[in-house]
Image (cartoon, rainbow, N blue to C red):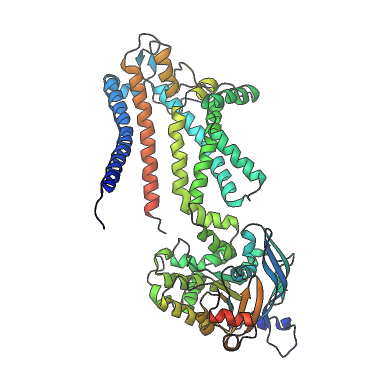
Amino acid sequence: MFVTTPFVRQKERRELFAKIFFGLMAAAMVLPLVLILTHLVYQAWPLLSWEFLSTNPTNGMRRGGIWSAILGTIYLVGLSLFVSAPIGVFAAVYLNEYARDNWLTRIINLAVVNLAGVPSIVHALFGLGAFVLFAGIGRSILAASLTLAIMTLPVIIASTKEALGAVPRSFREACWNLGATRWQTIRRIVLPNSISGILTGVILQVSRTAGETAPVMFTGAVFFKKIEEGELFAYAITDQCMALSMHLYTVTTQVTNTPEALPYAIAVVLLATVLLVNAVSISIRVYIRSRKKW
Amino acid sequence: MSSLGPSAATPSVAQTGNATPPAGITTRDLNLWYGAFQALQNVTLDIEHGIITSLIGPSGCGKTTLLRCFNRVNERYGYVTTTGEIKILGKNIYDEDVSLVELRKHVGMVFQQPNPLPISIYENVVFGMRIHNRRRELNRSATDQAVETALREVGLWDDVKDKLNMKATGLQLEQQQKLCIARLLPLKPEVILMDEPCSALDVEGTRAIEELMWMLRGRYTILIVTHNMAQARRASDTCIFMLLGEIIEHSRTEDLFIAPREARTAEYIEGRYG
């Protein structure tokens, strides 16, 4: 009794093997990230400077900086989230807090899930058809932002629903039984307790929108645009603009004799912006969560 | 302030003659379905105002369902169909002109798992006042007064008076449950429904809640669902035994436990099934 048989030893060996195998797979995920980052920064290093960030491209993209592309991306991301975040959050509140489980709700939920899976090039084409041509907005920051907004909307709805769903049902029951309306319950209890999750979901969309190329290329981003350097309001929303993602694409594929470091430098700036925004979102979440206990 | 309760204001609710005390809650042929499943069958009850009534019966017999009918919160839980009549202090709560929000203000509910809201102790107690009054109708002195009165009434004031701004979710379970009762009181309810209020508490906590029920008795009609027959026996005036959605027996608690009229009641309290 209780002795280690050969069969037990075999099972232990398999257990050890499985653990190491899965662990290696998990570790393998970190490696490419580290390699990408070090390679990018190493290649980009000669070009990275304050001047690179703050001046327009010159000499047919071969000299100068990427100021107009940085500002363009900020405009596109900011405006698209300004549109999609409120609509997405309020839609999710309706779906999670008000909607009964009937065929209409199921259709809406199905639409949300499927929209989230539509490739961005299809959104690009839709944006071109709907905003640029049909609505007559023309190729502009506005049209591109609206296209990006449509693209991020389902994801924001999904993440917000998840954040709302994480608020324990017993809180809602307590409110209803005191005679609170649904809106009072949402405003006083549900939203204050889910706001950190909602914000995280919204801010994560910054990185996604900033990186998208196809939608902005179809609807508002241009090859080259000269704007006033250092002026934050250099674009109007009806202007076309440059964007980091598209700039990276064009200097890599459309322009010859560019400095070797240029695409890497653009990529580093794009990545750094995204990581910065994510870091901010994580700090906000940690801060809000530290004040919440249940 | 509310020591007399509204029964004094509605003296004509006694339907069965002047000799009987005013009815707190009456139901007539109450039937309830969850989808196709019938959870309550022809429930007809007269519950006196101001006493404690316990509801006992095996799991799934409809105790909690019946309790949730009295503030109509059942309707928030999926597809519920109800027929029949429930009168609380003479008013049929299924009438067209009944506001659910007002009904739930007057009929409070205490849950099995204490569920204080994730806000301060102070705000928990005044939560009901805040949602039932316009902001300009409340001032600091009125809410301070209400918090102190309610917390004193449940015997929590001395424990928490120095930490009213603490999150209520950080209290001990027993204190949380007392707080959940205290937050009903500023709304001056007529009826307090309790759904197994002690099952998450230890012996001391249970004793404290039962003592509190006796303190509140007289001003509020209290209905308590319990799995614990000993609790029903020591902590209620009348007792209702339910089985498969039907009322089997409703009588004074001593009578029901000592001399049950129905064989099924006798078998249940002996522990033959359940």
Res A23 seen here = yes
Q: Nearer the viewer, residue B103 or B268?
A: B268
- Tell me the quarter of the picture where residue B270 sits: bottom right
Quarter of the image where the C terminus of chain B is located: bottom right
Residue found at x 36% / y 20%: A55
The quarter of the displayed image where residue B89 is located:
bottom right
Spot occupied by residue B202 in the image (x, y as percentages of width and height): 41, 74
Residue in view at x 57 percent, y 49 percent: A96
**The N terminus of chain B, quarter of image:** bottom right
Viewer-proximal residue, A149 or B46? B46
**Residue A49 shows in this picture:** no
Which residue lies most toward the bottom here? Answer: B19
Report whether B94 appears left or right of A188: right
Q: Where is residue A112 in the image (x, y as percent from the top left)?
A: 57, 38
| Residue that extends furthest to the left in the rendered view of this protein | A3
The percent position of residue B147, horizontal first and vertical second, equals: 48, 72
Left or right: A278, with B183 as reference point: left
Q: In this view, does A275 lie to the left or right of A223?
A: left
In percent of width and height, residue B92 lies at 72, 71
Name the residue nearer the viewer: A269 or B244.
B244
Q: Number of labelled discs?
A: 0
Q: Tell me what residue is drawn at x 39 percent, y 45 percent.
A: A284
Q: Is residue A160 above or below residue B105?
A: above
Furthest residue toward top:
A257
- Image position of A46 with respect to A180: above or below: above
